[in-house]
């Protein structure tokens, strides 16, 4: 019986961790003042009729603090990569020299920094909501377990308390990671 509760809590923690990982992946695509391969590596590029992440089609490096260098494995994909970057909401201009694509990362304006900070807060709130949804689902399962006499009232209360502590820890992580990303964006 107690094993069922442990499994439930472990599963919930795994799901909360996935919510954090998804938020961090989103954060990598929000640009700061510096060039970072994470900015474009998940960008979807049309490749022979299917959409593929850019990181599977090219090597992406940041040889300078304000520049990304994209070297496709297959030179025939240069135009598709260039098009995907141009059409993305990153507001970056790719320079194609026939072999590689260079992207100069312009310094962020104060207005753009504020827009990006708002986007960070939106992603943080989405992660908090996901974590709370996992909590709600687990609470329902605990209640169901108690109603079906799989666990007693004390175990139910103890499990709810553990779940609340777990949620609190993960919400704190969301806040810490979000604050760090916001500091990166606001850095001149």
Image (cartoon, rainbow, N blue to C red):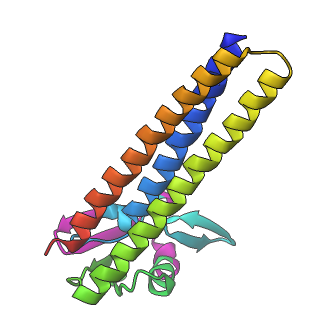
Is residue 67 left or right of 45 when viewed as pictured? left
Vertical order, 13 against 73 (above or below)? above
Most extreme residue toward the right, as rendered?
Answer: 148
The residue sitting at 86% across, 21% down in the picture is 148
Q: Residue at x 62, y 18 (%)?
A: 6
Q: Which residue is at the front of the view, 143 or 11?
A: 143
- What range is drawn magenta here? 56-80
Tell me if 31 is positioned left or right of 154 in this view.
left
Q: Is residue 108 magenta?
A: no
Quarter occupied by residue 152: top right
The picture places residue 150, in percent across and down from the top left corner, at 80, 15
Q: Is residue 40 visible?
A: no
Residue 45: x, y in percent?
Answer: 55, 72
Residue occupying image coordinates x 47% and y 33%: 165
Q: Is residue 88 visible?
A: yes
Quarter of the image with the N terminus is top right
Residue 106, by quadrant, is bottom left
Query: Left or right of 102: which side holds 171?
Result: right
Tell me the quadrant of the picture where the C terminus can be found: bottom left
Residue 64 location in percent, x, y? 16, 69
126 to 163, vertically: above or below? below
Q: Is residue 136 above or below residue 48?
A: above
Question: Residue at the left extreme?
Answer: 188
Give the x, y percent position of residue 137.
Answer: 70, 41
Residue appearing at x 52%, y 35% in the figure: 164
């Amino acid at each position: 019986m107690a094993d069922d509760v442990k499994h439930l809590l472990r599963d919930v923690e795994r799901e909360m961790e996935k919510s954090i990982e998804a938020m961090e992946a989103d954060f990598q695509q929000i640009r700061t003042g510096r060039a970072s391969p994470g900015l474009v590596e998940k960008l979807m590029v049309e490749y022979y009729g299917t959409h593929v992440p850019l990181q599977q089609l090219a090597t992406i490096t940041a040889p300078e603090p304000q520049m990304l260098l994209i070297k496709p494995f297959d030179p025939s994909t240069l135009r598709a990569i260039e098009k995907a970057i141009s059409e993305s909401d990153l507001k970056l201009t790719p320079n194609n020299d026939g072999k590689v694509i260079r992207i100069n990362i312009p310094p962020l304006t104060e207005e753009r920094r504020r827009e990006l900070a708002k986007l960070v807060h939106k992603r943080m709130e989405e992660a908090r909501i996901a974590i709370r949804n996992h909590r709600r689902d687990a609470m329902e399962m605990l209640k169901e377990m108690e109603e079906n006499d799989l666990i007693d009232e004390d175990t139910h209360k103890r499990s709810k308390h553990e779940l609340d502590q777990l949620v609190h820890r993960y919400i704190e992580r969301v806040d810490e990671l979000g604050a760090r990303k916001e500091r990166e964006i606001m850095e001149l």
